[in-house]
């Protein structure tokens, strides 16, 4: 049975929303944060990558390491990103790093934008790639956010990657 990208995204979103419903009444008023002296912010989730008229499903992990600068509108930090997406007959691996600007808000939603550079490997070929993206962390539990992100990876075969998962702070030692 073949599911379209839209069907996969809708099914995943419905599952996440169904799991979130019981916790909605207990949700904190602010998202969990990281990337400061006390903690890093780890993001883990399911990804859908659309490339060359094909969609691969995979896994992504990213980490906001530290803040370079901070002001009343937000903060700029260093982020690393690792992704694996399986297509019919191939696996695309991305390893990137760059800058993320997280906007300061007073609500349950924390938006961010990021610019990354790195490598994309597929089918015995490795290319240097830039990526631009944006996402939202939405407060769910005390130390867990839901995260949605859309990024565009620019290569010979340009790709759009949709991420749906969680983010949580990891204490520094």
Image (tube, grey):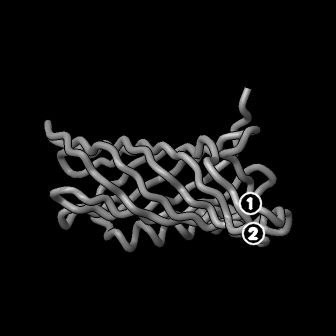
Q: Residue at x 45, y 45 (%)?
A: 81
- The quadrant the N terminus occupies is bottom left
Q: Residue at x 64, y 52 (%)?
A: 69
Count of marks overlaid on the render: 2
Q: Residue at x 59, y 55 (%)?
A: 76
Rounded to the nearest angstrom, the CA distance separating label 1 from label 2 is 6 Å
Q: Earlier in the sequence, mark 1 or mark 2?
A: 1
- The quadrant the C terminus occupies is top right
In the image, 75: left or right of 22?
left
Can residue 58 be seen in the rendering of this structure?
yes
Quadrant of the image occupied by residue 94: top left
In the image, 142: left or right of 17?
right
Crowd rating for badge 1 (residues with CA inside 10 Å; few <14, some 14–19, many 20+): many
Q: Which mark is residue 31?
A: 1
Can residue 1 be seen in the rendering of this structure?
no
Crowd rating for badge 2 (residues with CA inside 10 Å; few <14, some 14–19, many 20+): some
What x and y, as percent, mark residue 135? Answer: 54, 65
- In the image, residue 88 above or below residue 21: above
What x and y, as percent, mark residue 99? Answer: 49, 52
What x and y, as percent, mark residue 132? Answer: 39, 62
Between 100 and 87, the one lying in front of the other is: 100
Q: What residue would you read off at disc 2?
A: 108
- In the image, residue 81 above or below residue 102: above
Between 103 and 69, the one lying in front of the other is: 69
Q: Residue at x 28, y 61 (%)?
A: 159
Quadrant of the image occupied by residue 14: bottom right
Are the residues tagged 1 and 2 within 8 Å (C-beta)?
A: yes
């Amino acid at each position: 049975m073949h599911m379209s990208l839209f069907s996969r995204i809708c099914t995943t979103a419905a599952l996440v929303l169904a799991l979130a419903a019981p916790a909605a009444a207990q949700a904190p008023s602010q998202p969990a944060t990281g990337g400061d002296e006390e903690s890093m912010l780890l993001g883990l989730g399911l990804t859908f990558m659309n490339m060359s008229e094909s969609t691969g499903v995979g896994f992504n992990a990213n980490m906001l390491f530290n803040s370079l600068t901070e002001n009343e509108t937000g903060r700029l930090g260093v982020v690393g990103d690792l992704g694996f997406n399986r297509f019919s007959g191939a696996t695309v691996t991305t390893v990137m790093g760059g800058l993320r600007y997280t906007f300061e808000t007073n609500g349950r939603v924390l938006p961010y934008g990021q610019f990354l550079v790195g490598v994309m490997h597929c089918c015995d070929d490795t290319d240097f790639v830039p990526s631009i993206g944006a996402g939202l962390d939405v407060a769910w539990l005390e130390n867990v956010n839901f995260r949605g992100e859309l990024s565009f990876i620019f290569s010979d075969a340009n790709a759009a990657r949709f991420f749906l998962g969680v983010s949580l702070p990891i204490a520094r030692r």
